[in-house]
Amino acid sequence: MEAKAKARFVRVTPQKARRVVDLIRGKQAAEAVAVLKFAPQAAAEPVLKTVQSAVANAVEGAKRNSERLDEADLFISEVFVDEGPTLKRFRPRAQGRASQILKRTSHITVVVAERETKGRAR
């Protein structure tokens, strides 16, 4: 069972979001949530919400298909951050000039999958 969640147009630079995403890649879903709750970076909050959404999508998908799903078996199989559109703003500078400010956005994608246990037959 695999479930996906996307957070699009998040007002965090992709470079800063990738630092947070690297902390949880390949971890159990519950452990990833615990790590993100205590991460000091501002990008941890939208990543946390996306992970929680992916877990909820997996649970709902299993209910819809009448399958058994243990949340403890879920792990982060894929997580990546793509660059979204950049908002361009201008700031007044000295002598009548203006300088451009680039406000970057991100698209965060999290895929959770069920880890196969050794003694389990399907």
Image (cartoon, rainbow, N blue to C red):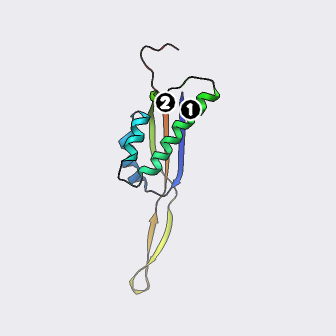
- Give whichever of 103, 114 is nearer the camera: 114
CB-based contact (under 8 Å), mark 2 and mark 1: yes
Q: Nearer the viewer, residue 75 or 92?
A: 75
Q: If you read the primary sequence from the N terminus, does the residue marked by circle 2 or circle 1 appear first? A: 1
Left or right of 65: which side holds 103?
left
The secondary structure type at the circle numbered 2 is helix
Q: How far across and down, in percent of the image, does residue 29 sit?
A: 44, 35
Q: Residue at x 46, y 60 (%)?
A: 104
- What type is the residue that disc 1 sits on? Val
> Residue 47 location in percent, x, y?
45, 47
Label at residue 107 = none
- Along the line of sight, the residue nearer the viewer: 103 or 118: 118
Q: Which residue is mark 2?
A: 71
Residue found at x 55% / y 33%: 58
User: Is residue 32 placed above or below 67 in the rendered structure?
Assistant: below
Residue most extreme to the bottom: 95
Q: Residues within 10 Å of mark 2 (few under 14, many from 20)?
A: some
Q: State which quadrant residue 78 falls in.
A: top left
Query: Rounded to the nearest whole Å, what is the CA distance between mark 2 and mark 1?
Result: 8 Å
Estimate the x, y position of residue 121 in percent, counting from the top left. Answer: 49, 13
Residue of label 1: 59
Quadrant in the picture for residue 33 = top left
Residue plotted at (50% across, 61% down)? 86
Q: Quadrant of residue 95?
A: bottom left
Q: Residues within 10 Å of mark 1 (few under 14, many from 20)?
A: some
| Amino acid at circle 2 | Glu
* Relative height, residue 91 to residue 120 (above, below): below
